[in-house]
Image: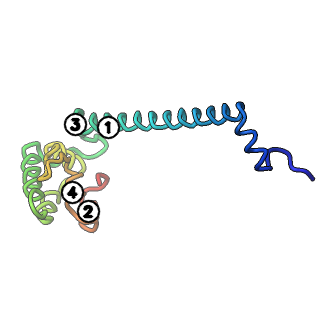
Amino acid sequence: MRKKGLSNPAVVATVLSSPQGQKAIANSQDAARKGISTGITFLKILAVGGLLTLLYYKVLKGFSRLSEDTRYKPSNINVTQARARAEAIYTALLGFGANYNTVENNLTGLNHNGFIRVYNEFGERRSTTLVKMNLVEWLQDQFKEDDIAKLRFLIKGFF
C-alpha cells in the first residue's frame, strides 16, 4: 500500500522551496502572528476588565449595609448598644494579636438582627495594613478556623 502525500523529505524540500511553498509558509506565519496577537489582546481586555471590576467593588461601591431580616425576631439591642459593641470589637481586633475573648463576649447574646446591627455599625474599617474590611472579613482574617467555628455557633449564617 502506497502512502499518499508528502512523505518523502526530498519532495517536501522541493515543494517548500517553490514560490507556492514560500507563499504557504508566509501565510501560515502571518496566521500564527494574527492568532497570537488576538489572544494577547483578549487577555489584555480581560485584565483591564478585572481591574475595573475590582476597583468598582472595593473602592467606589464601598460598604453596603445589611437590612434587618423580618423572618427573625427584632434586634435585641438598639443602635447605640450596637455602636458600642462594634467599637469594642474593633479595639480588640486592631493592632498586634486579636483579643478573642473580647470579641466573643460582645457577640454573645446577639440574635440574628442584633448581629446585623453590630455589622452595620462596624461598617468598613481600615486595618494596620490599610485594607478596608467589614466585620466578617476582620473576623476571618484575625482568627484561626477553630475560633471561627465557635463564633459560627454564636451567630449562624454569616461566616
Residue 148: mark in rendering: 2
Q: Residue 58, relative to residue 143: is it above or below?
A: above
Please tell me the numbered disc located at residue 139: 4
Dot 1: element: helix
- Name the residue that disc number 1 marks: 51
Label 3: few (<14), some (14–19) or many (≥20) C-alpha neighbours in 10 Å: few
Q: Which SS class for mark 2? A: helix
Mark 2 surroundings: few (<14), some (14-19) or many (≥20) residues within 10 A: some
CB contact under 8 Å: marks 3 and 4: no
Q: Determine whether, in the image, residue 131 is placed left or right of residue 42.
A: left
| 28 and 23: which is toward the camera | 23
Q: Secondary structure at mark 3?
A: helix
**Rendering quarter of residue 149:** bottom left
**In the drawing, does residue 40 fall left or right of residue 155?**
right
Question: Mark 2 touching mark 4, by CB under 8 A?
Answer: yes
Front-lying residue, 54 or 38: 38
Q: CA distance from mark 2 to mark 4?
A: 7 Å
Q: Position of residue 117 (x, y in %)?
A: 17, 44
- Few, some or many C-alpha atoms within 10 Å of disc 4 (few <14, some 14-19, many ≥20)? many
Of discs 4 and 1, which sits in the foreground?
A: 1
Where is mark 3, residue-wise? 59
- The residue at the point 28 percent across, 41 percent down is 69
Instruction: Pinpoint residue 4: horizontal percent, then vertical percent.
Output: 85, 45
Quadrant including the C terminus: bottom left
**Which of the 4 image quarters holds residue 30?**
top right
The colour scheme of the drawn protein is: rainbow
Q: Give the image location of residue 102, x and y in percent.
A: 10, 62
Amino acid type indicated by mark 3 = Val
